[in-house]
Amino acid sequence: MRTKVVIIGGGPSGLLLSRLLSLENIDNVVLEKQSREHVQGRIRAGVLENGTIEMLRLAGVSKRLDNEGFKHNGIELSFKNHGFRIDLKKLTDKHVTVYGQTEVTKDLYEIIEKENGNIINCAEDVLPQKVGEINSFVTFKKNGIENKIMCDFVAGCDGYHGISRKVIPENLINVFERIYPFGWLGILSETPPVKEELIYANHGNGFALASMRNNNLSRYYIQTSLDDRVEAWDDKRFWEELKRRLPIEASESIITGPSIEKSIAPLRSFVCEPMNWNNLFLVGDAAHIVPPTGAKGLNLAVSDVYYLFKGLKKHYLFNDDKDLKNYSTKALSRVWKAIRFSWWMTTTFHKFPEQTSFDQRIQDSELEYLENSIASQTVLAENYVGLPYEEL
Ligand code: APR
Ligand code: PHB
């Protein structure tokens, strides 16, 4: 079998790239390790920047998003149980859209299948081979049978634990990493969100976040230590701790209920440079990870898709490789700004185990400054709603 682009990984970045290429009649095959049900069962952040929405619109999957997504013109921040609002709309003339990543993935799967796209689920032992040579190919097993797909390009959209980054010789890449000394304990509950907008809270006991999926589905998080276990947090303990950390007004009005999902996730920042090796291009979590504070993960994956899609389109339609050659540089320039922003959100809102009273005062004054300075709020707002994509 032969195709133009083999896409390894059928998460949001792989699916979006596949759909955009198909719309330009550029043949591609998606090889996904897991079943469709598994991929669609993952619960991940759902705050979409305008650039992300535009890309989903280009892919023809914005109908449900336009109907069901919540437009948020602001966010609430709090410290010492006192909240204040960042008016995103007023500061940037932009908003964000709250729409679960799970839904984005479902929408993409549906349209790709309807339009006879090529997604191979449950593909085992996927391996890109002869990368950079004229006869590159990808091998995999399906139902125990060995398969081989010849291709021009490989898009590594297979997340942090995928194979694509690992086949690049170690001496050809640089890795930058920060592991944070805490995790997030998150729950989903079928209760109305405590407020129409998200609340990011800095509290003496640690960070808390109030988010949502829809009018009767709330998503809440609290910072926990790395060795904490989900079993140690029954619902009662979770709600008590969350209330302690949220601004007073929110903790007084929050409606609690049984959790329908509960999990702990570690926080890390990670970047791999460059984001390609010859004709193998890394996209999304395969190349970089951000901590969830600021919800940049999915948005960054989509901006990578933007740069790679443009590059592949120019290659096939105009025989011009300039943008493909610049892919890594262009994508990384935006990636690093989001890495910086989510690192800043994380360090400003969390308690670090080694935090001194000096560090505490610095955090408090950072937040006080933010509350009272339009300049400081503007910096946060323009990063939160998403920095522009660079024209190619
Ligand atoms: N072979 C094939 N598929 C693989 C392999 C492999 N060896 N390893 C992983 N995969 C699949 C995973 O099962 C998953 O479906 O690749 C997909 C990668 O998807 P994500 O991890 O969601 O990564 P990505 O598509 O880049 O999405 C962007 O940014 O911060 C996050 O929450 C955000 O998940 C979102 C991500
Ligand atoms: C979420 O809803 O899961 C969410 C929202 C905002 C974040 C992180 C996670 O910054």
Image: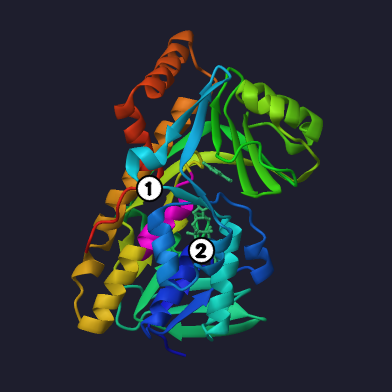
Q: Is residue 229 above or below residue 56?
A: above
Disc 1 C-beta below 8 A from ligand 2: no
Residue drawn where x is 57% and y is 83% of the image: 114
- Badge 1 is on which residue? 94
Q: Is residue 364 magenta?
A: no
Q: Amino acid at mark 1?
A: Lys
Magenta residues span 295-305
Q: Residues within 10 Å of mark 1 (few under 14, many from 20)?
A: many
The residue furthest bottom is 1
- State which mark lies toward you, 2 or 1: 1
- Badge 2 is on which residue? 12
The residue furthest top is 357
Along the line of sight, which residue is nearer the eye, 339 or 24? Answer: 24
Where in the image, quadrant-wise, is ligand 2 located? top right
> Where residue 145 appears, x then y in whole percent?
62, 84
Disc 2 C-beta below 8 A from ligand 1: yes
Q: How many numbered discs, if any?
A: 2
**Residue 59 figure quarter:** bottom left
Q: Main secondary structure of the magenta part?
A: helix
Residue drawn where x is 56% and y is 55% of the image: 99
> Where residue 79 appears, x then y in whole percent?
52, 20
Residue drawn where x is 33% and y is 34% of the image: 378
- 152 vs 181, left or right, is left
**Residue 142 figure quarter:** bottom right
Label 2, label 1: how far apart the Cα atoms are: 23 Å
Quarter placement of the C terminus = bottom left
Q: Is disc 2 placed on a helix, strand or loop? A: helix
Colour option used: rainbow
